[in-house]
Image (cartoon, rainbow, N blue to C red):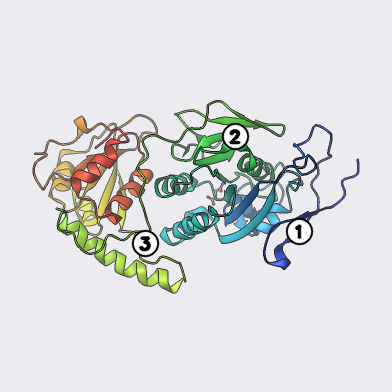
């Protein structure tokens, strides 16, 4: 069958972007292809697709280059590279930003948060394209801050740029849209679709910097996608241990119940600066700014001076400890003198930091500032601590939140 160009009608309000042509799908259709809901007289699900950049939107110098590429494609161009989906869903698309995910910061997170929050009112499923390097941080943040009810939020990226031989982006995107449109994806919260696997955004971690099989999820994959079929291994479920924060609410200035005056002072300063920047960028909800939390990497001869220096420049600190909470005694001593909460995470990919391994402190004391991260890695611990500080939680409440992840 010839591969004719196909016209897709979308539900964009803007006429200019409400149609696009599939220039070259490279895909011959057959009776067994994706279910044709449109011609079965069924109402098509409405799917919103947000573009944020990443390798999936990148071009390299030649078809054999899989490194040294740059972000260059818009979400509209990405959609033009996938097979016709007009028989299974109506789509609307929007570019939120177009960057390598190393550039995703609090501003971009808020744009993604605001985009998803608004789209939840109207759409049956939402797809977000994203670079893979920090994808797990964004999915953790979104699962922790948005209750999407039944609406699936499917994040997708790729490991090869669009220009490479066997680029994985188009298939990954196609699968993500099919997953978002599939009724069986409802009630599962934030999902990640990559390399034919479906995972929970809360648990996923990037474990390989180069291969197509770049993500790993020790809690197990939720399902897979093979030849236009979505398969789930489990009924709908959301991560039980996830603490939900309400970003829209700024609790005001009454910090009377909190014992962390040092941390709160830093929080206030960082909030002031961030609010200015956010307002400049025209981001809605500028009050939702985040306190600064840094991460330090533990190693032999880690300098207590460095820990002190960094600890005095932030509202919270995460340390990737050696083993299950190990740090040199001199570092433990300095940490306990800091006026901020310090989360002990781990540099090992697997396992957890239990609270039994924290340096001995008097839990009743206002100075007991060390918290175990449980199974959360340093980058997820950082986001969780930021959210706790944003909510102006005191040390006991922060501990309680981390205890969901079996730390505390
Ligand atoms: N595979 C990728 O998407 C990596 C890229 N550097 C990014 O995170 O944006």
Mark 3: is the Cβ under 8 angstroms from ligand 1? no
What numbered label is drawn on residue 92?
A: none
Residue 210 showing in the rendered view: no
Residue 248 image point, x, y percent: 38, 59
- Residue 292 in the figure: left or right of residue 27: left
Residue 74 image point, x, y percent: 65, 59
Q: Residue furthest right?
A: 1
Q: Nearer the viewer, mark 2 or mark 3?
A: 2
What numbered label is drawn on residue 20?
A: 1
Compute the Cα span from label 2 to label 1.
28 Å
Q: Nearer the viewer, mark 2 or mark 1?
A: 2
Q: Earlier in the sequence, mark 2 or mark 3?
A: 2
Work out whether residue 304 or residue 24 is closer to the camera in this orientation and state it. 24
Residue 224 showing in the rendered view: yes
Question: Do the CB atoms of the residues marked 1 and 3 lie less than 8 Å apart?
Answer: no
Compute the Cα span from label 1 to label 3.
36 Å
- Residue 178 in the figure: left or right of residue 328: right
Residue on which disc 2 sits: 184
Q: Quadrant of residue 228?
A: top right
Residue on which disc 3 sits: 288
Compute the Cα span from label 2 to label 3.
33 Å
Q: Earlier in the sequence, mark 2 or mark 1?
A: 1
Above or below: residue 233 compared with residue 96? above
Mark 3: secondary structure? loop
């Amino acid at each position: 069958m010839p591969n004719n160009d196909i016209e897709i009608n979308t539900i964009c309000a803007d006429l200019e972007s409400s149609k696009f042509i599939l220039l070259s799908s490279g895909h011959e259709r057959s009776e067994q292809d994706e279910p044709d809901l449109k011609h079965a007289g069924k109402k098509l699900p409405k799917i919103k697709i947000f573009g944020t950049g990443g390798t999936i939107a990148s071009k390299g110098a030649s078809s054999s280059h899989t490194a040294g590429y740059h972000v260059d494609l818009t979400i509209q161009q990405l959609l033009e590279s996938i097979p016709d989906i007009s028989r299974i869903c109506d789509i609307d698309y929007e570019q939120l930003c177009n960057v390598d995910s190393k550039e995703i910061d609090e501003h971009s997170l808020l744009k993604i948060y605001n985009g998803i929050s608004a789209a939840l009112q109207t759409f049956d499923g939402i797809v977000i394209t994203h670079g893979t390097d920090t994808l797990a941080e964004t999915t953790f943040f979104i699962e922790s801050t948005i209750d999407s009810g039944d609406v699936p939020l499917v994040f997708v990226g790729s490991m090869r740029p669009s220009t490479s031989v066997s680029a994985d982006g188009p298939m990954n995107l196609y699968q993500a849209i099919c997953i978002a449109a599939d009724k069986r994806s409802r009630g599962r919260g934030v999902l990640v679709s990559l390399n034919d696997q479906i995972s929970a955004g809360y648990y996923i971690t990037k474990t390989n910097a180069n291969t197509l099989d770049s993500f790993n999820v020790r809690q197990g994959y939720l399902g897979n996608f093979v030849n236009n079929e979505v398969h789930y291994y489990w009924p709908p479920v959301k991560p039980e241990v996830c603490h939900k924060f309400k970003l829209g609410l700024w609790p005001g200035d009454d910090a009377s119940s909190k014992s962390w005056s040092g941390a709160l002072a830093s929080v206030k300063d960082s909030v002031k600066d961030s609010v200015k920047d956010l307002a400049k960028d025209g981001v809605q909800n500028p009050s939702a700014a985040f306190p600064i939390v840094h991460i330090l990497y533990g190693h032999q001869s880690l300098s207590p001076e460095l820990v002190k220096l960094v600890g005095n420049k932030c509202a919270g600190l995460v340390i990737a400890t050696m083993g299950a909470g190990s740090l040199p005694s001199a570092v433990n001593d300095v940490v306990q003198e800091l006026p901020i909460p310090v989360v002990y995470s781990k540099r090992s990919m697997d396992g957890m930091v239990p609270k039994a391994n924290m340096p001995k402190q008097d839990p009743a004391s206002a100075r007991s500032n060390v918290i175990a991260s449980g199974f959360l890695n340093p980058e997820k611990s950082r986001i969780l601590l930021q959210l706790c500080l944003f909510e102006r939680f005191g040390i006991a409440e922060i501990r309680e939140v981390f205890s969901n992840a079996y730390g505390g």
